[in-house]
């Protein structure tokens, strides 16, 4: 009797799980389909040009101010795409070494009380909403960049630049990289701390027992052993970076420029617009159907980019594991 | 035992985890190039004792120790202050753990890493030689020579334990500490390791914790019996097994615990 | 049908009063609108059992915009949903195009036009009752409303709508008004697709939106002020100069009397009502804002950017101007509320609340509230220019 009852219970539970799994799957599918349908208007007109052509800011403006019939459905987000990749890559370059370094210090090289305090500070930092980082960026990072790298002469010069005119105000690719880097550093640190803590203690004992220095045990044994966790952290941080909108809206400059290598160091001072920021910044103009579709198309590119990124990271991870 | 023959001397050692005392007034001298077996019921402090010898217990929060442990004439707790000296001590003293713990990397790297770390050296040729030699010393080479680049975690338990022993050999220690090295192995692997220990005795001082009385009988030169943190009896193997002095030892050997 | 019925009943009741009533000078008669007394400079009078009050007071407190046509001697009252003409001395009035008979006509007393409070209030949609004991006319229009209202759109209009909603919900606890931003564009699309009951716009509706059935009702005006950093020596610019600066034709402050430095442009994202205002008032389709201008999502962000960069120029709704930046004297006129009200200041535009179809029900009441004396006080306190 009793076991029968339990079986019924188990069965019900199983079915509930199944139904919620199916529902979850359907919901994701629905979201994807919804986004693609909304994006189709622009994607079908723009084709591959959507990521190989430039001029997004102007196209938005033209779509918004022209009458319904004359609106362009062609959009080119090359600038946004490149800005998104550059910002994320730059931020990772900044945050990965710092984050892992901090995690190592927290886990291995600090007094327990200090480690605990650092740990909670990092978790707190990781949970601060991005708009706060945006504000800090706006108040501290942007003025700093302007004061240190942008002279009045440079400002005037670039108003006439033959390759690409621009206003150098401090809001720039560099500001985005720094703010995003600072923002994802705590996430990366927290995940790395977890990854290091998950490494069996016996590896550390064995390493130290062999007379290997603590520092070398960390770099040669613990970190390689924590590799999967580190990769997961990097993927997550990059995902947050690719999708970050608010903070970057505030510090990146908001114009769909493609930074020019020919500009030298000014490359990093170029005002840019990332895909996610574009969706937020331009949403006020969404009452225009073409713009709505263009923004959903940005969403499609965003989704594909993060999917590609996490896929390629997984491939790299597998390759590294093989070794 | 003559003085020159003593590898490790332990005098009046007490130790605690937090408030809890786990070693009580241990006195013991361990002979060079011999096998010393430590036996005793679970939780009596054998592992704690072993880990005190190479100061791996320093990693445990709240661990305290008093008394003197001298290795090669050096008081390892009072005389060693610098991290580099501690490294040097541990390089003199390999340790093989109860559960095989090869690093999560290739078989080759498991051996190459400690060797190149100790000798600060990256000559591939020299490393190759040492890897092969150490693997041969533990009779593992023939089994793995085709797959030195395979992950060490893919080896069987017995192979992993032999790999861990080989890993110790790469740093040419004077002493090797074994904590129940055969507890997770089948009889054949166990015998292989015992043979190996007998060979190693020619060059190294071996201290081995074991729950297997037969094993102690087979390989040990001297045997120590721990009970509730105390060293109850410590004597040469034959005397220990045939004429134990202490009542507790007799009971333990008779299996009356 | 129902409407007609009530009208018939009202008319019958009025007729009864005509037969019974006698004219009398009314001392101590009070008029309450939604619980608070109407303070008038001319006391209400009682005529044939009817209380008459100066038309401006009763109409404006119910959100009406009044006008006096001297030629036809007619009082005109326009609210979001009603349009009442009341010729002085005649017993016929027009309410939303339909002729109505009243028992006591509007009259002129001591040079002031007085109208029957019950007729006017009821024509505008209010409930009117007479408390004989206290000699009080109780007009109930903004109290006792129930239901929900979604208002959204222009962030320029938002603070006014929010404060008005709060005040209205105090009068009508059964009413729930949510006010959201998003910009004029969001207001327009929301009102069009029904996700909003009322859309807020700080730019004039496009012809196509009106064609789609959106009816905009003006609630006040806003002025655009061009701002520069306080350290900037430039004080005044003409529209022509501002246009050339923002189109990138003038790139250096020294070309408009400042120092030798790059002009850093700050603009708003497409869809911003303030940007539309700037475009329609200053750029006037003669030129486009330079594509390198830095776009911002809100007035405060533009202000922040200009306040922090000596070489910056931007524009705000006049209501957002404060001492952190410097307002530019435009065409020789200082940007101020007063100058905008008089029409001297050149860059002024309308603020709208719009509904799909002619406003009715709670939506009409909300709009009328914003246009009422109280609502316009709120609007003025948010630094906009009131309707009257
Ligand atoms: N890290 C630690 N922190 C606190 N107490 C510990 C720790 N390690 C061991 N102990 C305690 O110290 C006592 C001795 O433990 P130890 O590991 O030395 O026993 P053992 O003789 O090796 O036992 P076994 O034969 O089961 O391995 C036990 O009571 C154990 O619970
Ligand atoms: Mg043990």
Image (cartoon, coloured by chain):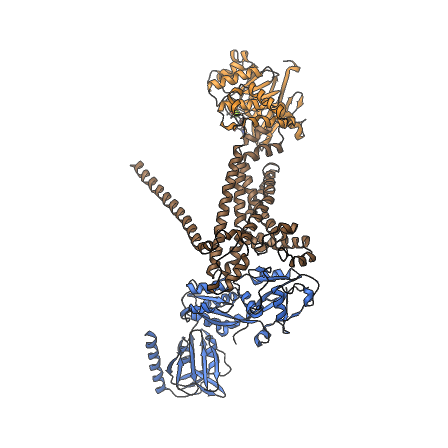
Picture coordinates of residue A77, whole percent (x, y): 53, 53
Picture coordinates of residue C60, whole percent (x, y): 48, 77
Taking C150 as reference, is B11 left or right? Answer: right
Is residue A19 at all visible to an observer of this figure? Answer: yes
Is residue B246 at all visible to an observer of this figure? Answer: no
Quadrant of image for the N terminus of chain C: bottom left
Taking A308 as reference, is C99 left or right? Answer: left
The residue shown at (33%, 82%) is C12
Picture coordinates of residue C291, whole percent (x, y): 58, 60
Picture coordinates of residue C26, whole percent (x, y): 44, 85
Q: Is residue A165 above or below residue B226?
A: below
Q: Is residue C218 above or below residue A222?
A: below
Instruction: Name the residue furthest right.
Output: C259
Front-most of residues A69 and C356: A69
Place residue C87 in its image quadrant: bottom left
Instruction: Identify the hue of chain C.
Output: blue
Front-most of residues C132 and A20: A20
Could you tell me how many numbered marks the image carries? 0
Instruction: Identify the hue of chain A.
Output: brown
Instruction: Identify the hue of chain B.
Output: orange
Instruction: Name the residue furthest left.
Output: A1
């Amino acid at each position: 009797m009793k076991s029968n009852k339990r079986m019924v219970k188990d069965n019900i539970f199983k079915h509930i799980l199944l139904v919620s799994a199916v529902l979850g799957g359907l919901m994701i599918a629905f979201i994807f389909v919804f986004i693609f349908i909304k994006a189709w208007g622009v994607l079908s007109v723009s084709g591959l040009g959507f990521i190989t052509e430039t001029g997004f800011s102007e196209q938005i403006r033209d779509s918004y101010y022209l009458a319904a019939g004359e609106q362009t459905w062609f959009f080119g987000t090359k600038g946004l795409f490149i800005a998104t990749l550059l910002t994320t890559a730059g931020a990772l370059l900044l945050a990965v070494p710092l984050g892992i370094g901090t995690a190592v210090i927290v886990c291995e090289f600090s007094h327990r009380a200090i480690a605990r305090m650092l740990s909670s500070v990092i978790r707190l930092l990781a949970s601060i909403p991005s708009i706060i980082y945006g504000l800090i960026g706006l108040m501290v990072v942007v003025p700093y960049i302007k004061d240190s790298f942008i002279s009045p002469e440079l400002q005037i010069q670039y108003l006439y630049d033959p390759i690409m005119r621009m206003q150098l105000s401090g809001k720039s690719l560099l500001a985005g990289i720094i703010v995003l880097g600072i923002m994802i550093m705590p996430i990366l640190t927290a995940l790395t701390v977890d990854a290091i803590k998950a490494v069996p203690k016996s590896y550390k004992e064995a390493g130290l027992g062999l007379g290997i220095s603590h520092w070398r045990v960390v770099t040669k044994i613990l970190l390689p052993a924590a590799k999967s966790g580190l990769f997961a952290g990097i993927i997550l941080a990059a995902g947050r970076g690719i999708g970050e909108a608010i903070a970057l809206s505030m510090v990146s400059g908001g114009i769909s420029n493609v930074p020019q290598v020919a500009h030298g160091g000014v490359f990093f001072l170029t005002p840019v617009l990332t895909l996610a920021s574009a969706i937020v910044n331009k949403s006020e103009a969404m009452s225009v159907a073409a713009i709505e579709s263009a923004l959903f198309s940005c969403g499609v590119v965003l989704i594909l980019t993060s999917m590609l990124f996490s896929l390629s990271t997984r491939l790299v991870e597998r390759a590294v594991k093989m070794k | 035992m003559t003085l020159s023959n003593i590898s490790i001397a332990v005098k009046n050692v007490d130790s605690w985890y937090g408030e809890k005392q786990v070693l009580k007034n241990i006195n013991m001298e361990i002979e060079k190039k011999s096998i010393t077996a430590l036996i005793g019921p679970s939780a009596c402090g054998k592992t704690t004792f072993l880990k005190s010898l190479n100061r791996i217990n320093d990693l445990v929060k709240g661990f305290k120790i008093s008394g003197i442990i001298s290795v090669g004439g050096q008081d390892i707790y009072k005389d060693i202050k610098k991290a580099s000296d501690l490294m040097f001590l541990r390089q003199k003293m390999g340790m093989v753990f109860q559960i095989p713990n090869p690093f999560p990397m290739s078989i080759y790297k498991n051996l190459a890493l400690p060797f190149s770390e100790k000798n600060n050296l990256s000559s591939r040729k020299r490393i190759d030689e040492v890897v092969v030699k150490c693997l041969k010393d533990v009779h593992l080479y023939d089994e793995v020579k085709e797959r030195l680049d395979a992950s060490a975690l893919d080896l069987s338990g017995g192979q992993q334990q032999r790999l861990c022993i080989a890993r110790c050999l790469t740093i040419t220690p004077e002493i090797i500490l074994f904590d129940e090295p055969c507890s997770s192995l089948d009889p054949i692997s166990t015998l292989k390791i015992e043979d190996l220990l007998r060979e190693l005795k020619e060059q190294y001082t071996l201290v081995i914790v074991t729950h297997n009385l037969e094993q102690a009988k087979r390989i040990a030169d001297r045997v120590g019996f721990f009970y509730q943190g105390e060293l109850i009896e410590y004597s040469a193997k034959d005397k220990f097994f045939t004429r134990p002095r202490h009542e507790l030892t007799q009971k333990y050997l008779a299996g009356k615990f | 049908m129902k409407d007609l019925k009530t009208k018939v009943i009202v008319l019958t009741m009025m007729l009864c009063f005509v037969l019974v009533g006698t004219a009398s000078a009314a001392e101590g008669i009070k008029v309450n609108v939604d619980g608070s007394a109407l303070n008038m400079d001319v006391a209400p009078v009682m005529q044939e059992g009817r209380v008459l009050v100066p038309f401006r007071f009763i109409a404006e407190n119910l959100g009406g915009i009044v006008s006096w046509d001297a030629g036809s001697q007619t009082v005109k009252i326009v609210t979001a949903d009603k349009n009442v003409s009341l010729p002085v001395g005649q017993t016929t009035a027009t309410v939303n195009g339909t002729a109505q008979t009243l028992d006591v006509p509007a009259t002129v007393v001591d040079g002031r036009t007085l109208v029957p409070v019950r007729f006017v209030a009821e024509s505008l949609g209010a409930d009117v009752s007479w408390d004989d004991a206290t000699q009080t006319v109780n007009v109930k229009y903004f109290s006792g409303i129930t239901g929900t209202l979604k208002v959204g759109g222009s962030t320029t209009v938002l603070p006014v709508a929010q404060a008005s909603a709060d005040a209205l919900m105090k009068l009508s606890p059964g009413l729930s008004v949510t006010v959201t931003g998003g910009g004029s564009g969001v207001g327009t699309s929301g009102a069009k697709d029904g996700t909003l009951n009322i859309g807020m716009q700080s730019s004039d509706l496009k012809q196509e939106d009106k064609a789609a059935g959106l009816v905009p009702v003006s609630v006040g005006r806003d002025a655009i002020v061009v701002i520069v950093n306080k350290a900037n020596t430039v004080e005044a610019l003409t529209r022509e100069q501002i246009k050339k600066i923002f189109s990138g034709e003038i790139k250096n402050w020294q070309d408009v009397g400042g120092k030798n430095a790059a002009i850093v442009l700050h603009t708003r994202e497409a869809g911003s009502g303030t940007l539309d205002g700037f475009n329609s008032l200053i750029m006037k389709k003669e030129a486009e804002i330079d594509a390198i201008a830095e776009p911002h999502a809100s007035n405060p962000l533009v202000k922040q950017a200009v306040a922090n960069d000596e070489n910056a120029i931007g524009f705000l709704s006049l209501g957002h101007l404060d001492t952190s930046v410097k307002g530019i004297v435009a065409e020789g006129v200082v940007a101020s509320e007063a100058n905008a009200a008089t029409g001297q200041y050149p860059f002024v535009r309308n603020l709208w609340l719009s509904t799909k179809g002619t406003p009715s029900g709670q939506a009409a009441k909300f709009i009328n509230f914003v246009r009422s004396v109280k609502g316009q006080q709120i609007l003025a306190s948010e630094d906009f220019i009131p309707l009257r």
